[in-house]
Amino acid sequence: MDGLTSAQVAVARKNDVPRRSSRSLGAIVRANVFTLFNLVIAILWALIMIFGEWQDGLFGLVIVANAAIGIIQELRAKHTLDQLAVINEAPVRVRRDGAEQQIEPHQIVLGDLVLLGPGDRLLVDGEVVASEGLEVDESLLTGEEDPVHKHPGDQVLSGSFAVAGSGAFTATQVGTDAYAVKLAEEASKFTLAHSELRDGITTFIKYVTWLTIPVGALLIYSQVRNDSDFGTAITGAVAGIVTMIPEGLVLMTSIAFAVGVVRLGRRKCLVQELPAIEGLARVNVLCVDKTGTLTAGGMDLDEVLPLRYDEPVDDALAALANVDPRPNATAAAIQVRYPTSPWKAVESVPFSSARKWSGADFGDNGVWILGAPDILLEPGTPGYGQAAKLAATGARVLVLCRTEALEGSGAAVALVTLKQRIRPDAKDTLRYFAKQGVIVKVISGDNPEAVSAIATSLDIPGGDRAVDARTLPDDKEKLAEILDANTVFGRVTPQQKRQFVAALQSRGHTVAMTGDGVNDVLALKDADLGIAMGAGSPATKAVAQVVLLDNRFATLPHVVGEGRRVLANIERVSNLFLTKTFYAIALSILVGVLGLMFPFAPRHSTLVNALTIGIPAFFLALAPTMERSKPGFVPRVLRFAVPAGLIVAAAVFLTFWAAGGGSSLNADRTSAVIALFLTTWWVLVLIAKPLTMLRVALVAAMAGLFALAFAVPFVRTFFALEAGDVGNDLTAIGISVVAAVAISIAVRFSRTLRT
């Protein structure tokens, strides 16, 4: 039991496991550089360099800039995540050279003697060598709901966690050999998958890729057939194909997620899985645990109220508080008044959330238990009514009982009250959620009257009607009805918390769950979004997607706000990019079928796309918003982008067709570029709504830059803009105005379909 020596530790295998919060530099570079779209654009750029003019290859530099920005932003997110992950890692207690010490998880070595207490997560596999009522929950690995009592010689697996008692085990498998690491090798990889947003964008990209092949082939054929100059034909074809590709959409999505991670990191909020950012925006039900969330961590012993004066109440309390070498919050509060005890326990039962009591046999001094009055006492027995009255004031009430055996009943000897500290920011935070349409459910293992008193003091709607979870049905449908109709629940077991989450989800709710104790682990794992407090148990923090490292409940509004900002803005940006894709596809089909030259060159599309999509998208992707995200991302974007894209294509085609014949190809294309800018600029105006001062400045600046491109001779020459025919240019403006009105009507109509 002395553990390894320093010399043995130095040569033993370490617990090297990759951190799940971020991916490697190489993976980030590969994800941003080696993409299908980049490959297509690189080939098109090479064709322009061979057959066209270098100015038309400017779109290649945009891809380089996009990749660089994406890499830089993801590296910033990686740096933030890695720093916060180190802060979040709970130290592991081991015994080495005969002394207990705390080490970082990666410093565990094969053969280490690892010490366990309630809430500790097992990071490596091992064999139990000591157990004092040690109970381990293996449900995350096996699905078995009941904790398993562990005795010397029993095996324990990484991924499980201690829920009661204490003990020690010798590490037999570390690093990638550990059971949980093998199971999680694929699941723990850094990913943005498993979200409606990501799946929607993937769907867009898949269909656009398949459409690009036949449409691109038609366009190349028509351009080559229509023009004797092969270079001009290739240039026109490349202009159409490049514009079809929403190359910046994935980039903007990655940047929005990465910036969200960095912003939350500054508020000491660790996002352990990036899809959690999306979950933040979709949440409409927030289940909060009273202890540690609405109330601050820790408690203060208030009163000890003897019911029998012939019993050694103080001695018994002191003895029970000092039985466990790693006391829970309740025992720690009692220890402040009773720091030591001469009584020695012959046998003990540690506290667990399922039992709601702990106890010990002190030999000649008798058998004593301490726990919840409504669990240990029968209605009508001494102390029961008084305990209920005390609980109604918001205090945590325990009963001290003397009994014949270590079981959940006995004769009440004293009542013990503990004061709980309500978080000063709790009321404002709850008010925020009510204003945002997020329903709050208070779920606690405490006495319903005590939970109700806390909820009422925080002005939670329905807080005066606490439901005793012991009376709830097992049927999911009936349970869901009761959950919808009520707000506050007491005496909820860990397994019931899990059932609550499933029942709420069955009603179509997106459920977030907060918690800090080991009894919250299963519900956090099942919730759409698990949020743990930084001071919570290691097991709780391990399964949560979001960890509030500063333990501030008031951080949650910022967390939800950041998620909403990310999703709402990605939807805006998707509208921009996919409008471009659809007008490019429509134009390509039109000119391909009719055998006309493409209405603009690559350098023209580079200019217009930069001013109406590229530059604005960076600002819009990061702008603040408080819109709650709703399901239906793909249909909403299509309802906007398809009609807008088709109208833009019609306006550009009509302008180019009307201008044709009387002037040069370059002058005709300039008229088409004017129509293209004006119509897509109007799309930008619609997407930027509501128009704040900053957004008005943004869209005005883009219009000013386009006018500047015409006004400055060097820029005009570089982008091949030839404003020679005033009649054609006025025609372009007139058609654009009509198109802008048509786009506005189409967008308004699409919104009526949405509602």
Image (cartoon, helix red, strand yellow):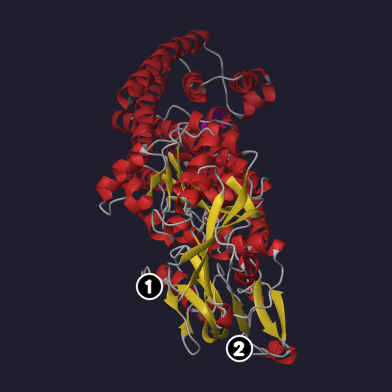
Where, quadrant-wise, is the C terminus in this rendering? top left
Circle 2 packing at 10 Å, graded few (<14), some (14-19), many (20+), is many
> Is residue 448 visible to the viewer in this orientation of the structure?
yes
Outermost residue toward the front in this view: 310
| Kind of residue at disc 1 | Thr
**Relative to 243, is 636 on the left or the right?**
left
> Up-down: is 627 above or below 199?
above
Magenta segment: does it hold 258? no
* Region of the chain picked out in magenta, as a range: 603-610
| Kind of residue at disc 2 | Gly
> Up-down: is 130 above or below 450?
below
Q: Label 1, secondary structure: give it.
A: helix
Q: Mainly helix, strand or loop, the magenta region? A: helix
> Is residue 277 visible to the viewer in this orientation of the structure?
no
Where, quadrant-wise, is the N terminus in this rendering? bottom right
Residue 235's spot in the image, x, y percent? Answer: 48, 37
Magenta segment: does it hold 604? yes
In depth, the one of 444 and 657 nearer the eye is 444
Residue 499's spot in the image, x, y percent? Answer: 35, 54
Name the residue rendered at 48%, 25% in the picture.
Answer: 687
Name the residue rendered at 42%, 39% in the picture.
Answer: 487
Name the residue rendered at 38%, 39% in the picture.
Answer: 486
Location of mark 2 (residue): 111
- Say which mark, if any, is on residue 142: 1
